[in-house]
Structure formats: C-alpha cells, structure tokens
Amino acid sequence: MRIDRSWTAGRALAIVLALALVCGVAAPALRADLKAALAEKDLEKRSKLALDNAEAVLQTARSAYQQGDIEKTKAAVGEVQESVELAYKSLDDTHKNPRKSPKWFKIAELATRDIMRRLDTFDHDMSFDDRPILKPLKDKVQQVHEDLLLGLMEGKPK
C-alpha cells in the first residue's frame, strides 16, 4: 500500500492546529479586547470590535463555568454585557439611519443573534441554580437585537 506523505503531513498539521484551537492555545491571540474597542475612533468599527470581544469573552465564561469558577464566570458575563452595550451605543452615536446605511447595523444584528443562540445553549448546559447569572445578559442582548432589527426594518434611528 502506498501512502501519499504530503497529504498525510498536511492532514496532521490541520489536526494539530484544530486541537490547539480547541484546547485554547491560540485563544489569547484570537481574543479581542474591550480596551482596544474603546480606543477605536471609528464608531462602526468600535461596534464590531466590541461584539468580537463579547463572543470571545462568552467562550471564556463557558470555560470558567466548566471549571467550576463561578466568580470568573460572573465577571466574564458582565464583560459580555458591557461589550454588547458598547457596540449598540457606538452604532447609536453614529446618528445614521440603519435603513439607509445598513452594513454595520446588520453585522451587529447578526452578531447579537449568534450571541443569543450561544447564551441559550450555555443556559441549558448550566445547573438550574446557576441560570440566574445569565438572565440579565440574555435580556439585554435580546433588547439590543430587537432594537437593531427594528431599526433595519423601519429605518428609524432610536
């Protein structure tokens, strides 16, 4: 039997990289930072950076919860909420009509929908007693998502 070594080496490299990502080795390099978002002068890009941070920190919250660190989980959940609020406020501060300039509003709407989906999964994976930790965050993300969607559909700024 003949083995194609280049295919095997490429496949092995892909597996090693995938394992590194799953284990969190590359996670710090991928993780956005809320301070970097706050430093961004372009409000629309700031919104995107804040939502990227929210997604990264939500993964941190899940990892902390799986390790049994409730305090770190609560801190991460708080940062996710700050990130979502910053993203929405940044878009609101542009004073643009979402219907006429939908690009960044649609990006934010899709990101908040994804965050809501991840929060639901996280909520189902949590112990019943720990679920109140996520309630305020879920409510805020739902409100921001609905406001973004309404702005895109009706074209009225908040």
Image: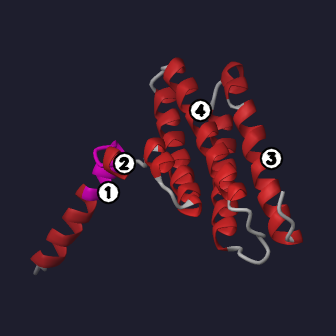
Q: Which residue is mark 4?
A: 77
Q: CA distance from mark 2 to mark 3?
A: 31 Å
Dot 2 and dot 1 residues touching (CB under 8 Å): yes
User: How far apart are labels 4 and 2 at the CA level?
Assistant: 21 Å
Question: Does label 4 or label 2 sit earlier along the sequence?
Answer: 2
Q: Earlier in the sequence, mark 1 or mark 4?
A: 1
Q: Position of residue 51 (x, y in %)?
A: 57, 52
Which stretch is magenta? 17-26
Q: What amino acid is labelled 1 in the image? A: Ala
* Viewer-side label of 1, 4: 4
The mark lying in front, picked from 1 and 3, is: 3
Please say whether residue 117 is visible from this viewpoint. no
Query: Which residue corresponds to mark 2?
Result: 22
Q: Which mark is residue 62?
A: none
Mark 1 and mark 4: Cα distance apart in space: 26 Å
Local SS, label 4: helix
Task: Answer few, some or many: residues within 10 Å of disc 1's Cα (few below 14, many 20 plus, some between 14 and 19).
Answer: few
**Mark 3 highlights which residue?**
143
Residue 22 belongs to magenta span:
yes
The disc labelled 2 sits on which kind of residue? Val
Q: Which residue is mark 1?
A: 18
The percent coordinates of residue 153 (x first, y second) are: 85, 70
The vertical placement of 68 against 37, above or below, is above
User: On the picture, is 149 further left or further right than 120?
Assistant: right
